[in-house]
Structure formats: structure tokens, C-alpha cells
Amino acid sequence: MSFYNQKSSIVTDSLGNIFNLEWRDGVIIGYYFNRFEEEIEKVEIANNVLEEYDVAIRSDDCIYLIYQGNDKHLYLSNIFKEEKEITQITESPIPHVYNLQLLLDGDDIHIFYDILIDEGNKVYRIYHHHYNNNHWNTNIVEDTRVLNILNPINIICENEKIYIIFYDLVENEEIFVKTYDIFEQIWSNKTRLTYDTSSKLYLDTLLENNILHLTYSKYIDGNFGISYINFDISNNSFHKKVESIMSNIENCSHPILIKYLDKLWIIWLEYESIFSRYSTDDGSKWSNIYQWRESKHIDFVRYKYAEYPTKDSNKKLNYSFGKVYPDISFLGFGPLDNIIEIPLKKKKFLISKIPMI
């Protein structure tokens, strides 16, 4: 069995019902799992769709979907119970978009994406559209260069600010952050977060208690390991506290950060199997490495995750590995019921902590 790198998303509403969306050959299919009636309904959400799409849920359980059609227009669809409304939000066709992301902040809508503006120099432009008071405000966030492939961006909304974390080319590709003040509607200058000059792939972040957690795949000795860094941002700056290599150097990819109950998990893919570690002290110390036995024998995907906004949720995540339809469930965190403990191969470069000043 194997990992399927397909576009798939999960949304949970206020009642715990699950809405699973998948992109297949230009069609977005939805599977609605009714928690109380234990029924599954399959519906076609949109057709003639390019592969980039994103989904979010509002506090009234209305689900929003953003996608680009084959006609190169952007469409915003909102789905509420049995009703569906689709709105074309671009006046004219736009170039092919990448890293399309949707963020809801109350009644405000934020849309982000990359567009290739210089193919020869591999320059992409990050756009941000903010819908507020019946008006779209468009910002150019940053022009970025890539070395070989376009890496993902991450969007976080906390404390009346939006953080965008992205790659840009220096000597090699490094990771940067910019901050958007929602009230002032102004973007800050970018701040550089990594300085190690190694090749990097993938990206995930999580912000909690004024600590920004960051993970990515890092090229080391001819292979890839999972790198983790955290930053104290309490003084409107990014002060690095801890930097560690979390895995063995074994072709590791697609790292994910999940806060579940009292544990912060890092989960990654390694040779078609799922591995993870957890911390109970915001990333200073970590558990042993665990390989999840079940992932060796099933088909699974990486889900984009959106949850009904509530302060009472016991989990915080952007993505999760999970089983595929019809037995949808998360993998790689939670009770350690079916795992193999994996030794960490000791090398002097594996762990490095930055002392507090």
C-alpha cells in the first residue's frame, strides 16, 4: 500500500459532521458524512476546475471554496446546508495560480496565491485579496525567486494579524515571514527565519502562545531530514529559541505540525510510511521517534484541514495524514497503540539549541 499525493481536504462543522473534498480530473467531489444519521452523501461541487483549490468554514457553518476554472477565472463558492452559491470574483482571466489559499476572519475573506511573472528567472508574485465592507483590497505581498520548484506558503491568522511564511532565494532558498495588520491593512517588511544555506523542501507552521513553530525537509549528507525551529514572537520580533533535526536522515518529506491535547506533534513521511515525535514543553524536548505500523499496510493521503472556529477545540493543525474514503481517519498522532519505536542515529549535528539571552 502507499501514500497518494493527491489534492484532498477535510472540513468539520459545529456538530462534528465531516465534509471531504477531492479534486479528480477537473472535478471537485464532496463526500458529506452525517455524524448522527451515519449516512454518506456524494455530490459534485464544481467541474472544469484546475487543480488548485482551498476550503474554509465560517462560524455559522457555511463552507467556502475557492478555485480557478479552466477559463482562468477565480470562483468563490459558499455551501450552506442544501444550498450552494457560486460567484465569479475576477473581472477578467488571470494567469495560472499556485498555492491558492483561503482564510476567513469573521465576515472578512482573504485569498492568497502565487503567479509566475518571470519564467526565465523563476520569479513568482504572491497576491493577497482582502474582502472587507463589500470591497476587495488587492495587495502584492512579495516577489520571490525559486531555485528549482515552487515551495508552499503557509498562512496563519492570530491576534488581529495574518502571518505569511514563504520561501525566497538568497544564496539558496531560505524561509521568510511577513505580517499583515488587519485593521491598518498594511503588510510589514519581510523577516528572514532561516540562515543555514541548505536545500529545503515543504513547509508547515503553527502559532500558539506567542511561539511560532516551523518545520521543513532539509538536505543533509545526500538525503533529507526533518528540521524544526521555534521562535518567540511576544515582542513583535522573531527570536529563535530552539533548532533541531527531528528525524534520521532517510528521505524524509511532507512534515506536519499538530497540537493535540497537551502534545505538539511533528509527523512526516519516510519511505512510504508515517513517523512522528511529540513534545509536551513547546518544542524544547521531544519523545522518541515512532513509526505507525498501520501506515505500512494501507493507502493514505495528506489532508488539508479546516475546522469550525471555536476556542474549545482540542486540536490545532493545517494538515494531517489520514486514511482514504470511506474509512477517513487521522494517522500519526494520538494514543501510541500500534507503533514501532525507532532509534535516533546520533550525529553531532543532529541537535542544536540556541540559549536564551
Image (cartoon, rainbow, N blue to C red):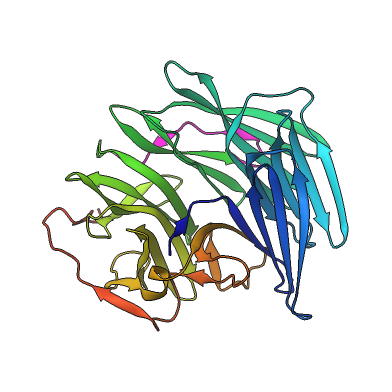
State the residue in front, 52 or 101. 52
Please state, as top left, top right, bottom left or bottom right, where the N terminus lies in the image: bottom left
Look at the image and tell me whether residue 19 can be seen.
yes
x and y percent of residue 132 in the render? 77, 39
Q: Give the residue at the far right of this rendering.
A: 83
x and y percent of residue 130 in the render? 70, 37
Which residues are drawn in magenta?
Answer: 181-194
Find out whether residue 189 is within the magenta segment. yes
Q: Give the residue at the far front of this rendering.
A: 1
| Residue at point 67%, 51% (across, down) | 55
Q: Give the residue at the far bottom of this rendering.
A: 337
| 25 lies above or below 250 | above
Q: Is residue 160 left or right of residue 147?
A: right
| Residue at point 73%, 77% (across, down) | 35
x and y percent of residue 77 in the render? 79, 46
| Residue at point 32%, 58% (across, down) | 271
| 18 lies above or below 133 | below
Residue 341, located in which quarter of the rendered image?
bottom left
| Residue at point 49%, 72% (across, down) | 260
Find out whether residue 205 is within the magenta segment. no
Residue 237, located in which quarter of the rendered image?
top left
Look at the image and tell me whether residue 210 can be seen.
no
x and y percent of residue 242 in the render? 29, 56
